[in-house]
Image (spheres, rainbow, N blue to C red):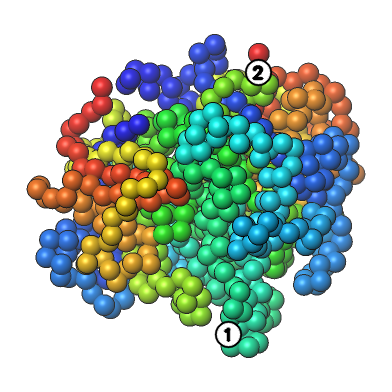
């Protein structure tokens, strides 16, 4: 079964990339990614108390989400959200593991910031957003799983969905098991036509599940440094979906035993 | 197609002959109330407390816990041994019980294994394996050679393990929204079925005892020193339990059906509920809308009811706002199971399914004196009641809320 989606706006944050335009330029020329880390400002939208406590992943996701919301002229207050990451609070979990292995006295902040849905919680506080927020994971296939959740939610509810795909940098020693060196993130404002409240579409895409077997697309060369990041698949997919014509027709990702085929489509295309 | 889709969109329909239902084709749970559906329900129906004073050899916290008997003795079959950890042992126990694996096999035969989705919730997955490995790294400067982070602690490990154990290959996802995780999986799976991404879905989840949640809740001063007493005037905090539960959903109307869910955010605080339970109200009203029901149609609410001062007060206010003061019988079964965190949603969904099937309200276990400040009709003793529809609430950190409505089939 093929699902049609509209992409209304997107956000991109990665070393050397601060916008969708930066990503498209990188995909076109293969140059532009930076080996340096990504400086992340503390989120101005959070109340002062929460702002001080904001961890790397909260800064990453809030900044990326704001980029997409501004680009799409969409209110952050009403949009439904899906947050997809392999281990979105790995760094915080590790600080908690350190406390548990020594004093066994983790700070209360550390504990509530360690839950996978901490970025979604802070986003809802920052935007005063009381809509559904769903945080999901599927290892390196987290983006494909999150995209499927966002697409199904957009279609079932008839409302736009903001999808965040992100991986914060992981620190030693667990970096050995989760080799994410730099933070990377994308944000997608998606809807399933017809969605009357949706802003104008910038691009279109279709999704289709296929039963196993088909080869999964390798990451393009420019994304190779981020091979271990679930969100590198999202950077690749965004470059295909929002890229200039003519470009690749689509890409194939894994989601468990299934393959998710993502194809570019005209933004105006509406299923009948 | 467009019209049909719009008609089916969440919250748009009245309950009627055409309203969508999602049949419950099988279920299974293990929790401190009992291993297996019958033992678990027996404890819940009678309010038998399954909690004990903590005697875990690896944790010296002064607290009451809901430990599932015999988890340490579970041996996974050789083909699944690479996934061995406490969380997967718990999941394995539930998968083996109550004909659940056979029900999934039948669904896989009927629809094809690739048409059976796996949508599971967990808060901490197998983090206890990493706690042990990390402590070893502190002591010895290296991780144990058999430490398998990806197959134990990673959030996707639960889905991949369950799919391997059940030999299904459909699309999968782990939902991790703290204590609403395995409630939200019902809503996600419903959307996947609705969109034709699968023909049946294994939903549910597992969370197991670990240092992170025991000491984490202790740090937040939310852990009771005594046994948890939801809605009691002297409640002091929650007791942590471990559990696994699974439900097989498909599109066929059955004896009990999933009718719809509501999801919301508090947009208030990371670990304190909105004082008037605004997000909780949104979730309950959303679930009613999705099910096409009115508040008066609900005969019983299985509350989140953690026994923290703040949760029970906010939830009672939210229940009064939605159902009217003392407008619906309410109980929390966490006095039986403890707060099983990411597994609580499915454990309590199964309790609601059983309450509907048995026509019986489970009491709020461990209740001595109901808090007079709470305007809710707390079920103090189990009693028979003809039920058609019932609701369960799950609220998590980050202000993440989910309510589910189940109903008897015609």
Residue at position x 38%, y 60% from top?
Answer: A230
Is B398 on the left-hand or right-hand side of B254? left
**Alpha-carbon distance for marks 1 and 2?**
56 Å
Residue B209 figure quarter: bottom right
In this orientation, which residue lies closer to the viewer: B132 or A84?
B132
Spot the residue most to the bottom: B140
Image mark 1: chain: B
Above or below residue B409? Residue B134 is below
Which percent across, then down, holds residue B169?
49, 44
Residue at position x 50%, y 13% from top?
Answer: B18
In this orientation, which residue lies closer to the viewer: B92 or A48?
B92
Residue B304 figure quarter: top right
Is A72 on the left-hand or right-hand side of B152? left
Please report whichever mark, 1 or 2, sits nearer to the chain's N-terminal start. Answer: 1
Q: How many marks?
A: 2
Above or below residue A18? Residue B58 is below
Q: Is residue B351 visible?
A: yes
Q: Residue B409, labelled with which disc? A: 2
Which percent across, then down, holds residue B57?
81, 71
- Report the quarter where the C terminus of chain A lies: top left
Which residue is the site of mark 1?
B142
Above or below residue A176? Residue B42 is above
Q: Secondary structure at mark 2?
A: loop
In this orientation, which residue lies closer to the viewer: B173 or A154?
B173
- Report the quarter where the N terminus of chain A lies: top left
Residue at position x 78%, y 18% from top?
Answer: B386
Q: Residue B362, labelled with which disc? A: none
Residue at position x 35%, y 72% from top?
Answer: A182
């Amino acid at each position: 079964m093929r699902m049609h989606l509209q992409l209304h706006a997107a956000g991109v944050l990665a070393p050397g990339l601060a916008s969708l335009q930066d990503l498209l330029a990188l995909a076109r020329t293969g140059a532009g990614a930076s080996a340096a880390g990504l400086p992340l400002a503390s989120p101005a939208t959070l109340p002062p108390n929460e702002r001080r406590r904001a961890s790397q992943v909260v800064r990453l996701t809030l900044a990326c989400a704001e980029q997409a919301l501004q680009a799409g002229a969409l209110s952050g207050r009403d949009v439904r959200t899906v947050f997809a990451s392999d281990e979105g609070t790995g760094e915080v979990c590790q600080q908690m593991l350190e406390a548990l292995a020594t004093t066994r006295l983790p700070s209360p902040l550390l504990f509530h910031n360690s839950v996978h849905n901490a970025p979604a919680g802070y986003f809802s506080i920052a935007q005063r957003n009381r809509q559904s927020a769903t945080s999901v994971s599927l290892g390196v296939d987290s983006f494909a799983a999150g995209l499927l959740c966002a697409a199904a939610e957009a279609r079932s509810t008839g409302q736009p969905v903001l999808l965040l795909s992100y991986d914060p940098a992981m620190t030693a020693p667990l970096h050995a098991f989760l080799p994410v060196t730099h933070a990377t993130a994308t944000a997608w404002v998606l809807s399933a036509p017809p969605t009357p409240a949706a802003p104008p579409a910038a691009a279109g895409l279709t999704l289709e599940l296929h039963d196993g077997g088909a080869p999964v697309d390798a990451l393009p060369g420019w994304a190779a440094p981020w091979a271990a990041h679930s969100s590198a698949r999202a950077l690749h997919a965004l470059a295909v979906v929002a890229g200039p014509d003519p470009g690749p027709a689509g890409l194939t990702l894994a989601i468990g035993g299934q393959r998710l085929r993502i194809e570019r489509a005209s933004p105006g295309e509406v299923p009948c | 197609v467009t019209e049909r889709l719009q008609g089916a969109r969440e919250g748009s329909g009245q309950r009627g002959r055409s309203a969508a239902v999602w049949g419950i084709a099988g279920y299974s749970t293990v929790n401190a109330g009992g291993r297996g559906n019958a033992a678990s329900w027996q404890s819940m129906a009678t309010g038998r407390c399954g909690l004990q004073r903590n005697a875990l050899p690896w944790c010296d916290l002064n607290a009451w816990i809901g430990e599932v008997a015999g988890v340490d003795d579970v041996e996974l079959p050789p083909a699944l041994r690479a996934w061995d950890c406490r969380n997967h042992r718990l999941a394995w126990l539930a998968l083996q019980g109550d004909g659940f694996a056979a029900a999934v096999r039948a669904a896989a035969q009927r629809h094809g294994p690739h048409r059976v989705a796996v949508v599971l919730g967990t808060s901490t997955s197998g983090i206890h394996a990493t706690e042990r490995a990390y402590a070893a790294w502190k002591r010895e400067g290296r991780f144990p050679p058999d430490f398998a982070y990806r197959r134990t602690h990673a959030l996707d490990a639960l889905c991949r393990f369950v799919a391997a154990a059940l030999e299904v290959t459909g699309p999968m996802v782990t939902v991790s929204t703290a204590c609403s995780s395995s409630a939200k999986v019902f809503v996600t799976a419903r959307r996947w079925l609705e969109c034709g991404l699968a023909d049946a879905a294994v939903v549910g989840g597992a969370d197991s005892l670990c240092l992170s949640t025991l000491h984490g809740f202790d740090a937040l001063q939310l852990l009771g020193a005594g046994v948890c007493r939801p809605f009691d005037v002297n409640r002091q905090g929650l007791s942590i339990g471990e559990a696994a539960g699974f439900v097989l959903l498909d599109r066929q109307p059955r004896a009990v059906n999933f009718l719809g869910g509501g999801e919301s955010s508090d947009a208030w605080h990371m670990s304190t509920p909105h004082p008037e339970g605004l997000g909780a109200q949104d979730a309950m009203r959303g679930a009613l809308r999705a099910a096409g029901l009115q508040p008066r149609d609900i005969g019983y609410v299985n509350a989140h009811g953690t026994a923290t001062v703040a949760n029970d007060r906010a939830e009672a206010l939210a229940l009064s706002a939605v159902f009217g003061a003392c407008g619906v019988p309410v109980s929390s079964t966490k006095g039986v199971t403890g707060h099983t965190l990411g597994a609580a949603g499915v454990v309590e969904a199964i309790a609601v399914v059983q309450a509907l099937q048995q026509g019986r309200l489970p009491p709020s276990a461990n209740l001595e004196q109901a808090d007079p400040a709470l305007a809710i009709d707390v079920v103090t003793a189990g009693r028979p009641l003809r039920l058609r529809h019932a609701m369960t609430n799950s609220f998590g950190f980050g202000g993440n809320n989910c309510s589910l409505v189940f109903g008897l089939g015609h």
